[in-house]
């Protein structure tokens, strides 16, 4: 084959690759430059700064929620809530008694003691009917009506016929429910109880794993109810950076575990860092702070000390 005939094609391929790299870089820059984080000003009010630390929205609110990956954030002023966009423009009036974050384009807003849902323009799309309201997730939200929890779709129609003592919205295709005998279990989107309500405590699934307990022992299950990490720990925390900190021998003192030994498990339930520490934080950016023999230091995800 004539090598000169290949040159335009090679040049074109390289040009396309270069353009793609530039577009991805521009997209990443845009995402970073558009990200806002809340801050507390010297006046004890809250506002938002960009990724470079520049004030974008002045600190004038009593409380604010993060934007996360949404276009609006809830803000509080004089005990009333509303929503602003990333320029600081008020989109949904500050007149509500309570507000959830925006999720799947809808915000839970409380007026005259009842929750409804508004869209991102502030238009009320589901009437103020409910005593409690969770964020929408996977197309449904759990709400409380007449002292029972039900699931509704984005039109406000009841999506699952059963009612529950308590319920949370769907995550990983499963919703946490509490039965009449105060046991925790999980249903699928048809309302079928796919993981029996047998746990004394449980939380919603995160990345297809959930913390559960029977008696005073904690572990993790998958979306089929299989034990991934056996219920043998005195306390466990959610996974951060792919590892979860676990405790054996400690006691829960209010909201904090004291005593015992801490270590870390992976998402297969394997104890990848031994339970040898007197205290530990969850991993963040590849490192965790641990305490051993009154000495505080950082370890990496292999358990090696970071010098």
Image (cartoon, helix red, strand yellow):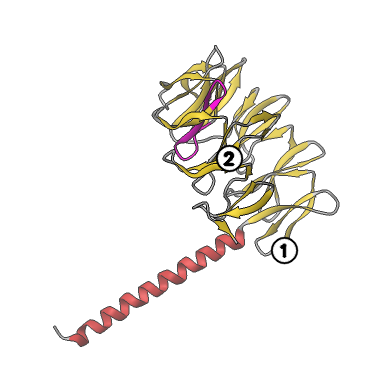
For the N terminus, the quadrant is: bottom left
Percent of width and height locating residue 267: 44, 41
Q: Could you tell me residue 268's position as x and y percent?
A: 41, 40
Q: Residues within 10 Å of mark 2 (few under 14, many from 20)?
A: many
Name the residue tied to disc 2.
262
Residue projecting furthest to the top: 181
Residue 213 covered by magenta stretch:
yes
Q: Secondary structure at mark 1?
A: loop
Q: Quadrant of residue 48?
A: bottom right
Q: Residue at x 49, y 47 (%)?
A: 242
Residue 229 found in image quarter: top left
Counting from the top left corner in percent of width and height, residue 285 is at 56, 55
Alpha carbon distance from label 1 to label 2 = 39 Å
Q: Residue at x 40, y 75 (%)?
A: 18
| Viewer-proximal residue among 17 and 305 | 305
User: Helix or strand or loop: what does disc 2 sit on?
Assistant: strand
Mark 1: few, some, or many residues within 10 Å (few <14, many ≥20)?
few
Residue occupied by mark 1 = 54
Query: Which sits in the foreground, 268 or 119?
Result: 268
Q: Nearer the viewer, residue 1 or 112?
A: 1
């Amino acid at each position: 084959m004539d090598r000169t005939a290949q040159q335009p094609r090679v040049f074109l391929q390289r040009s396309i690759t270069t353009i793609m790299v530039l577009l991805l870089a521009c997209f990443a820059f845009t995402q970073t430059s558009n990200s806002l984080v809340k801050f507390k000003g010297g006046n004890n009010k809250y506002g938002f700064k960009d990724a470079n630390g520049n004030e974008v929205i002045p600190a004038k609110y009593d409380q604010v929620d993060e934007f996360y990956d949404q276009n609006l954030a809830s803000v509080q002023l004089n005990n009333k809530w509303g929503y602003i966009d990333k320029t600081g423009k008020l989109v949904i009036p500050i007149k509500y008694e309570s507000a959830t974050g925006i999720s799947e384009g809808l915000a839970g807003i409380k007026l005259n003691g009842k929750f409804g849902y508004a869209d991102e323009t502030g238009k009320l799309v589901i009437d103020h009917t409910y005593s409690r309201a969770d964020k929408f997730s996977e197309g449904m939200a759990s709400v409380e009506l007449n002292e029972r929890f039900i699931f509704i779709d984005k039109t406000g129609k009841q999506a699952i016929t059963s009612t529950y003592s308590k319920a949370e919205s769907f995550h990983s295709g499963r919703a946490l429910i509490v039965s009449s005998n105060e046991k925790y279990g999980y249903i699928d989107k048809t309302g079928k109880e796919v993981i029996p309500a047998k746990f004394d405590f449980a939380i919603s699934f995160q990345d297809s794993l959930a913390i559960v307990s029977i008696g005073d022992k904690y572990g993790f299950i998958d979306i089929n109810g299989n034990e991934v990490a056996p219920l043998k720990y005195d306390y466990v925390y959610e996974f951060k950076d792919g590892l979860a900190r676990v405790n054996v021998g400690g006691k829960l003192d209010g909201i904090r575990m004291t005593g015992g030994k801490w270590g870390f498990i992976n998402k297969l339930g394997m104890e990848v860092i031994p339970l040898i520490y007197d205290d530990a934080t969850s991993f963040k950016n590849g490192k965790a702070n641990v305490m051993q023999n009154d000495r505080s230091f950082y370890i990496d995800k292999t358990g090696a000390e970071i010098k």
